[in-house]
Image: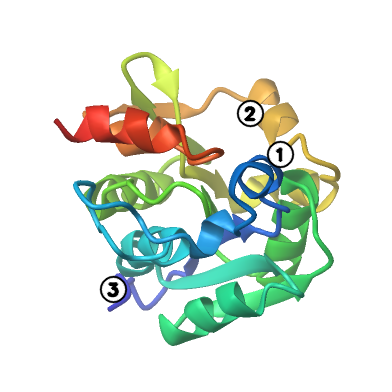
């Protein structure tokens, strides 16, 4: 179930970036990390990585648009099965993916940019970022001094987000403004899965 919103407010849209090539993980395993089941002993064990990321994001925002490689039929199917909107494109870097997602929902109140390979973020953490975005133009969670995801962008940043390209994400936008930082005890905000070795670090978080 999506988050409830005030009737007078446009939607806060979750943008899940899932159009990368999973290069490091695929080189090690020959498999797509987004469809990789989370190992036993970890939160959401047995659930594909992208499904876990979507399941945490979907209840915290008004709708979710997932920018996904158009050739990744497995990921597109998982996105649709969870009631989210796939935005298929050619394999794209994070900057281009953000621009495509914002362009798909240009009238949103704001956008929460999340990553498809970060399956351990708590829904409560995402809700806190979304709530803060109602009164701040730029919001990010912080875990033990490290800024993480999702990052919330208010509508004022739309022109800059439209122009993003390549794989630099929104670093330039973040560098140009001072985000509201929300301290959290949620290690999932800084834990992505780039290679099979990253499961070990995630297991350490779960202890």
Give the CA separation, mark 1 to mark 3: 29 Å
- Mark with earlier residue (2, 1): 1
Q: Which residue is mark 3?
A: 4
Name the foreground residue: 126 vs 25. 25
Residue 169's disc number: 1
Name above or below for residue 116 compared with residue 171: below
CB under 8 Å between callouts 1 and 3? no
Q: Quick one: label 2 or label 3, which is nearer the N terminus?
A: 3
Q: Which residue is mark 2?
A: 174
Nearer the observer, disc 1 or disc 3? 1
Confirm whether residue 14 shows in the render: no
User: Crowding near pointer 2: few (<14 within 10 Å), some, many (20+)?
Assistant: some
Callout 1 secondary element: loop
Task: Give x and y (percent) for residue 64.
Answer: 50, 70
Is 26 placed above or below 177 here? below
The quadrant of the rendering that contains the N terminus is bottom left
Instruction: Name which residue lies at 70% across and 59% down.
Output: 19
Q: Which mark is residue 192?
A: none
Please tell me which residue is depicted at 46% across the width and 73% down the height of the picture.
63
Residue located at (62% from left, 53% from top): 155
**Looking at the rendering, which quadrant does residue 85 occupy?**
bottom right
Residue at the (72%, 46%) spot, across then down: 94
């Amino acid at each position: 179930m999506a988050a409830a919103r005030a009737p007078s407010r446009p939607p806060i849209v979750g943008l899940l970036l899932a159009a990368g090539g999973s290069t490091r993980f695929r080189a090690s395993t020959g498999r797509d990390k987004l469809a990789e089941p989370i190992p036993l002993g970890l939160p959401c064990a047995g659930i594909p990585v992208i499904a876990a990321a979507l399941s945490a994001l979907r209840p915290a925002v008004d709708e979710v648009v997932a920018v996904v490689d158009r050739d990744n039929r497995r990921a597109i199917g998982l996105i649709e099965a969870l009631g989210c909107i796939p935005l298929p494109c050619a394999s794209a870097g994070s900057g281009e993916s953000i621009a495509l997602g914002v362009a798909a929902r240009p009238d949103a109140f704001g956008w929460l940019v999340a990553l498809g390979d970060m399956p351990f973020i708590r829904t409560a953490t995402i809700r806190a970022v979304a709530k803060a975005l109602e009164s701040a133009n730029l919001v990010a969670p912080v875990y033990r001094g490290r800024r993480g995801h999702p990052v919330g962008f208010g509508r004022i940043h739309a022109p800059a987000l439209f122009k993003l390209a390549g794989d630099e994400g929104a670093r330039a936008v973040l560098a140009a403004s001072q985000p509201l930082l929300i301290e959290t005890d949620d290690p999932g905000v800084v834990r992505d899965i780039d290679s099979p070795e990253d499961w070990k670090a995630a297991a350490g978080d779960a202890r």
